[in-house]
Image (cartoon, rainbow, N blue to C red):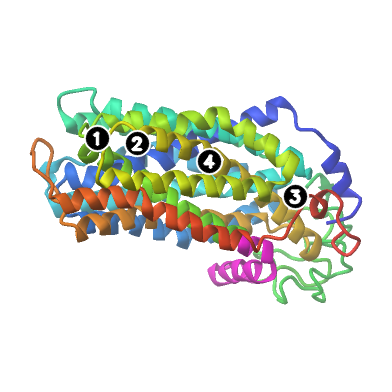
Amino acid sequence: MSTEARPERASVRLSPRTIALYAVGSVGTGGYATLPGLVLTYFLTDHLGVAALAAGLIVTAAKIWDVVVDPLIGAASDRQLARTGSRRGLMVTGALTLPVCFALTFAVPPSWGVIGGALCVLLAFLATATAFSLFQVPYVALPAELTGSYDERTRLLGWRVVVLTAAILLFGAGGPALRRAGADPVLGYLVMGVVAGVVIGVGMLIAARTAPSTGSGTQAGESGTQAGGSGTQAGGSGTQAGGSGTQAGGSGTQAGGSGTQAGGSGTQAGGSGTQVDSGWRHQYLSGFRALRRSQPFRALLGTFLLQALATGTMLAGAQYVATWVLRSEDAVTLVFVALVGPALIATPVWTAIARRTGKESAFRVASVLFAAAAATITIAVWAPGAWIYASVAAAGVAYAGLQSLPMAMLPDVISHDERRSGPGQAGTFTGIWTAGETVGFALGATAVAMTLAATGYISTVSGTTVAQPAAAVTGIVLSFSILPALLMAASLATLGRYRLRRADIDDPTPADA
């Protein structure tokens, strides 16, 4: 990236309209992350009668699919940005297709049988995951393009997390309420899927309007150039990251182009050669190269993956804790209010702490607080009771920081890499990031399912009442307490290797610039 462009971008304060429109996208993110994580495993085990281990494998398989497609979607988003000047197209496609797929996921009745029902849920959830990734991957890439300021990114992502927190509360409490809207559980799940899917899709469509659109054949407002170069990329003379007339060492063409950037008057990669192989193998290799060359990205991604796994176990276990520990299926609403409600107040506080101490220091404090709060819930093995809500609320205060701070640090990582390797790969980073987040939440649900299976949990169909063995109830408590606490503690080791600070972003060294 040219040294002239960065200070100009960093000096611009984001408008309230931009922040508001971007934040609305978290209605979609919160809804998709919350309802499947909260009720899908329970839907399979206690509505369709699927064995706990099989239910966990179904959820995991759908999430593994995300890991496969997210890097490809990230690369496609980068190509769309280079070709059209905007990432908006993929975001709109995901917003329009997700509501239908989401509703179909919860439209399966028990009468279809265990195998047939499980297969239909798997296929519908695979389609839902794909639609969500089409939106989420470019959505996560936008902050790095909207502002170059260290603190403005914290402000942007802080408000996004406020909306995310409200969305989690809305879907976490409203989803189960919709499910109980009628006496027929089949109709209840269908209503929940339809209403939630529509709300998620609308939020995504609104957020897609924040994607910068600079016109066909341009990127970042330049005519026929990428990131301020005249016939060059990243300021090189016919090179990208040291290549001679090539991009990433190739000598072919850019997606069938002929030395031009989708209609621009200059060329991309600056020489007579152009961007090579845009096939799936090249996209995965681009992701591995990004991981290899960016140490801050490796540290931040490892931390976020472990923390997604920790919060994923709590999310997947919440319904089971409500039903079998607090002895009320409806108590899941109170668990969610206790977890998410404090975050509405705490998010601005974490933003203020990050301004004073730095994002990484605030992130570390939030991680320690969450681990301590989760660990105290282990006492429920011997003394279950309403006191659990207090521990969950303390975890909720920390949860606000765990959501906002790493998301504000990711654009810093992308900017740091741009200075060293050239622009145009934000989608590659966010594709890997979204895949890592997905893996964490998926394995969280899998960990809960495996714990239930190992402790003898009994699956049922709707309308059937059983008594769970004491070992299964103990397993539920441990998967909601000590397991996420240990994972959160492990994430502190990877966070300790994160080296970027405020001065690295707002006052880069000449070598970085």
Judging from the image, what secondary structure is the residue with disc 2 in?
helix
The amino acid type, in three-letter code, at marker 4 is Ala
Q: Is residue 290 magenta?
A: yes
Determine which of the numbered discs, if any, sits on residue 217 in the image: 3
Identified at 68% across, 46% down, the residue is: 359
Quadrant for residue 247, please give it: bottom right
Judging from the image, what secondary structure is the residue with disc 1 in?
loop
Judging from the image, what secondary structure is the residue with disc 3 in?
loop
Q: CA distance from mark 4 to mark 3?
A: 44 Å
Determine which of the numbered discs, if any, sits on residue 388 in the image: 2
* Mark found first going from the N terminus, 4 or 3: 3
The amino acid type, in three-letter code, at marker 2 is Ile
Identified at 82% across, 52% down, the residue is: 503
Name the residue tied to disc 1.
326
Q: Residues within 10 Å of mark 4 (few under 14, many from 20)?
A: many
Name the residue tied to disc 4.
398
Q: Which tag is nearer the camera, tag 2 or tag 3?
A: 2
269 lies left or right of 122: right
Determine which of the numbered discs, if any, sits on residue 112 in the image: none
Please report contact status of discs 1 and 2: CB closer than 8 Å, yes or no. Answer: yes
Q: CA distance from mark 1 to mark 2?
A: 9 Å
Question: In this orientation, does residue 328 appear?
Answer: yes
> Relative to 181, is 346 above or below?
below
2 lies left or right of 185: right
Q: Which tag is nearer the camera, tag 4 or tag 3?
A: 4
The amino acid type, in three-letter code, at marker 3 is Gly
**In this picture, which residue range is highlighted in magenta?**
277-299
